[in-house]
Amino acid sequence: MANHNHYIVNQDADINQLQPVWAMVREGLGQQIPASDFRSWIDRLQAVPVDEDRVALIAPNTFSRDWIQENLFDLICKLWIKSDPQNRSLSLQVASGKGPSTNTDAGAKKADPASMSVADTAGHKYRFDNFVVGPSNEVAWAVSKQAARGPQSRFNPLFIHGGYGLGKTHLLRAIAHQSRAQSPTKKVLFLTAEAFVQKFVTSLRGTQSLEFKKNLRSLDLLLIDDLHFLAGKTATQEEFVHTLGSLIENGSQVVLSADRSPGEIAALDDRLRSHLSGGLVCRIAPAAFELRREILVQQVEEMKTEFENFKVPDDVLDFLASKICSSPRELLGALNMVVSGTVLIGRPVTLEQARDILSDVVRATRVKVSISDIKNGTTSWFGLGKEDLLSRRKTRNIVRPRQIAMYLAKELTSCSLPMIGQRFGGRDHTTVIHAIKTIQKLIAEDTALADEVEGLRRSLTKLQS
Ligand code: ADP
Ligand code: MG
């Protein structure tokens, strides 16, 4: 694999064309993000040409690269696509400290279809070994690993769906990264659906239409992220259906992601739908507390390479994992906020500091919910009688809601397991554990139930806002 820490610059590439484009992108950013973010992150970014087709944005350190990757890179790419008449691809890299070196194999690189990708960057940050696995994502993880092994997995196309921030892009990039690492000659292309549309539209305008198609169809592995973006875009879908058909026929692997299931994507081409049903559709469910906490632990481990003597106390991890339940993305964002409010300015991380720094976030994401709220909310959600949740009745239409209520009591309140058992008809804490485990497992397996739980959770957390 290429060394990602060293960016390569071709001195002949047209530097004059680059800075005005970057200035336009900066201007667009200035209008869309807070001035403080602009100063902290964008001001310190440098745009340098890599070769005719590629531009690198150089961040001063990995922390800032990762932050930008998470929070701004999508926006930067969008503005870039609009601003760059040469349609060069953009990557985000870290200054090597040694200064730019001259690219000697730019010619070889140019033929690589991967250079078609605008957002094809930082693949090394998203790997299988730093993807934390739990009941809500283990199926998606396992089939992704299988798809990375190639040449063609049994799951083709593989379609991974799940809510915002749950790890879809992480898995797709891990697949791309691993396949490239295993067989460097393999033609792998990762594209967001948005970039796909863009490529398609520009290829129609120019004379490169055939080349675009040929390039796509010669791939060994095609990954398209955020497919829901194609909803309603009939002409692009049409092209995509043909590409998909031809790739599958040739034995090439296709991996797709979207924020909802194929059935929920409006205006999806029927042939596309039928291709999808011939492959494997799998879902990433929201992460439970344990997984959220483990994701934090693993992120802290990664940060240790960045900051000397870096430590985050257990109570801070517990606090973050219990308060930020929306998605790993928000969770890691919160951790970053805590780190930049402490370590970066030379303070130790304490629970007190963390609470203080996140007070707004936590207030916004979470309203206080009591066990009574949960009981009332659950009975009315499922249309049960007041006493049903507390009763000893064992019919399934009562057992499930009861288990869901206990599960949510653990997720949304700070009550202990024995206390929850007590409040649900004087049950033992082992019953509560069993209920929580059952629901966790079902959430991972059963989309309808997962949606039910999510809907109820939302209605509960909205109650008092
Ligand atoms: P999506 O594409 O589903 O919106 P991402 O893949 O961008 O979500 O994930 C958001 C962030 O959370 C990324 O930084 C990603 O690395 C991280 N993340 C999500 N799930 C996991 C996981 N299981 N283990 C480690 N990191 C995760
Ligand atoms: Mg994504």
Image (spheres, rainbow, N blue to C red):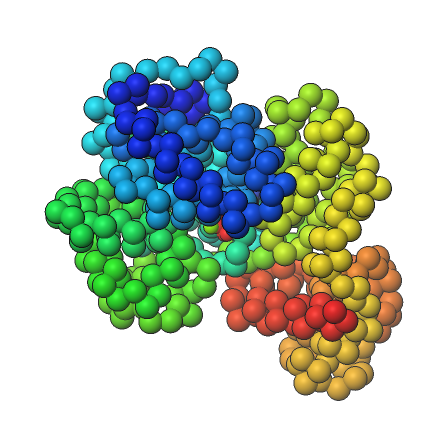
- Which of the 4 quarters of the picture holds residue 64? top right
Q: Is residue 208 above or below residue 267?
A: above
Q: Is residue 390 left or right of residue 137?
A: right
Residue 222 % position (x, y): 29, 46
- Which of the 4 quarters of the picture holds residue 315? top right
The quadrant the C terminus occupies is bottom right
Query: In the rendered image, is residue 357 in sight?
Result: yes
| Residue shown at the point (40%, 36%) measured from the top left | 22
How many numbered badges does the structure rendering display? 0
- Which of the 4 quarters of the picture holds residue 130? top right
Q: Is residue 247 above or below residue 260?
A: above
| Residue shown at the point (40%, 48%) measured from the top left | 78
Name the residue nearer the viewer: 199 or 79. Answer: 79
Name the residue nearer the viewer: 384 or 310. Answer: 310
Q: Is residue 211 left or right of residue 311?
A: left
Q: Is residue 387 above or below residue 368?
A: below
Residue 274 % position (x, y): 28, 67
| Residue shown at the point (71%, 48%) measured from the top left | 321
Name the residue nearer the viewer: 280 or 230. Answer: 230
Query: In the rendered image, is residue 241 in sight?
Result: no
Q: Is residue 8 left or right of residue 372?
A: left
Name the residue nearer the viewer: 244 or 144. Answer: 244
The quadrant the N terminus occupies is top left
Q: Is residue 455 left or right of residue 264?
A: right
Residue 118 % position (x, y): 35, 41
| Residue shown at the point (20%, 49%) measured from the top left | 203
